[in-house]
Image: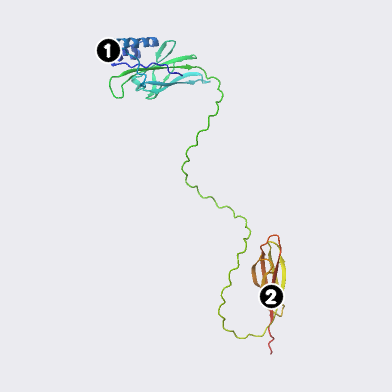
Amino acid sequence: MKNRGTKHCLSVFALASLAAAFLAPPAARAQRISLADLEQQVAVLEAKLADVRGEPIVDQDPDTEPTLVIKSAEVTYTGPRGDVPRRLVIRGDGFGVKRELRVFFGQDALFQQLPINQINPRGFDVNLPAGLQAGTYRVLVANEITPAGGGTPELQIDRMDFSIGPDGPEGLAGEVGPQGDPGDVGLEGPAGPQGERGPAGLLGPFGPSGERGPTGAQGPTGPQGQAGPALTGRWILDSDTCTGSGNCPFVATCDENEVLIGGACGDAGSEPDIRVVYSGPRTGEPREWFCRVFNRKQFVSRSVNYGAFCAKLPEVED
């Protein structure tokens, strides 16, 4: 909708003359007045002021924005199909207070003043007359404006044309506009609560064996103990293989007339892949040396040496 209104700035003298014909209460004049009559009355007042001042009276300075401006006039619809014009919402600037504002609405040069429902400095609404047909209408707003710095009040007028009719078919969707520049990155938000602990992962493969450390210094020789009974001892040595990544047990057993003195367990010396898990007497079996090893080499068997040292106690003479 285009704003084709004319803004007039009149002195107190013009305001007093126009008030009787234009801004008088509705009961003091006819209910309908043509726009041509309104504009003719304004022109007559301008001519009278020109005679008094000796200079022409023109519209507001084009370089100065008027105080009263209609920016939009929007019609709201009701009815079963939403096609009955019911209310007119006017937005703009300089509307002031309700008691000083006048609103005229019409078509074909016939206008009537409409009562104002609600108002604020930037907008107000009026109820439209019943029985309106589709077509182009005009709304005219007039108000007495006191300049911001004080001085002589001014009568300002603005108008706007708009159309009333049923909603047309929905138009085609417009093209997508170009993507805008990305905005600044926002501040980092607070850390969220810590989640629940997940299940334990699978056991990873053993890492490579570290280098053998240096041999420690030999300690002092301890005192010689008492001579024990003479023993007849022997080694029971054996070897076997442990499969790749296997956890393998081996047992060396002394005879029934022998006692277990000690034992040994380890790799055959070919590769340092055998790790001794346990090497010692077997629980509950005093004549067995138990050896358990783990082969750290996957898919490759390794040889294992193990054994027990057994001895016979000397027979005690009666």
Label 1 packing within 10 angstroms: few (<14), some (14-19), many (20+): few
* Residue 120 sits above or below residue 294 on the image: above
Q: Which mark is residue 314?
A: none
Element carrying mark 1: helix
For label 2, count other residues whose C-alpha is less than 10 Å away and answer few (under 14), some (14-19) or many (20+).
many
Left/right placement of residue 142 relative to residue 236 reads: left
User: Is residue 111 something one can see in this rendering?
Assistant: yes
Q: Nearer the viewer, residue 216 or 107?
A: 216
Could you say where residue 21 lies in the image, as x and y percent from the top left?
A: 33, 11
Give the amino acid type for the residue marked by disc 2 in the picture.
Answer: Ala
The x and y percentages for residue 244 are 70, 62
Kind of element beneath mark 2: strand
Where residue 264 appears, as percent x and y from the top left, is 66, 73
In this view of the protein, can residue 34 be seen by the observer?
A: no
Q: Amino acid at mark 1?
A: Arg
Disc on the earlier residue, 1 or 2: 1
Residue at 31 percent across and 10 percent down: it is 47
Q: CA distance from mark 1 to mark 2?
A: 137 Å
Q: For the residues labelled 1 and 2, say whether their Cβ atoms are less than 8 Å apart.
A: no
Residue 299 position in % (x across, y down) = 70, 60
Work out which residue is located at the far bottom of the displayed protein and give it: 318
* As drawn, 264 above or below 47: below
Q: Relative to 289, is 178 on the left or the right?
A: left
Q: In front of the other: label 1 or label 2?
A: 1
Instruction: Residue under label 2, please give it.
Output: 308
Q: How many marks?
A: 2
Query: Which picture quadrant has residue 92?
Result: top left
On residue 53, the disc is 1
- As drawn, 134 above or below 175: above
| Quadrant of res 279 | bottom right
Query: Which colour assignment does the render follow?
Result: rainbow
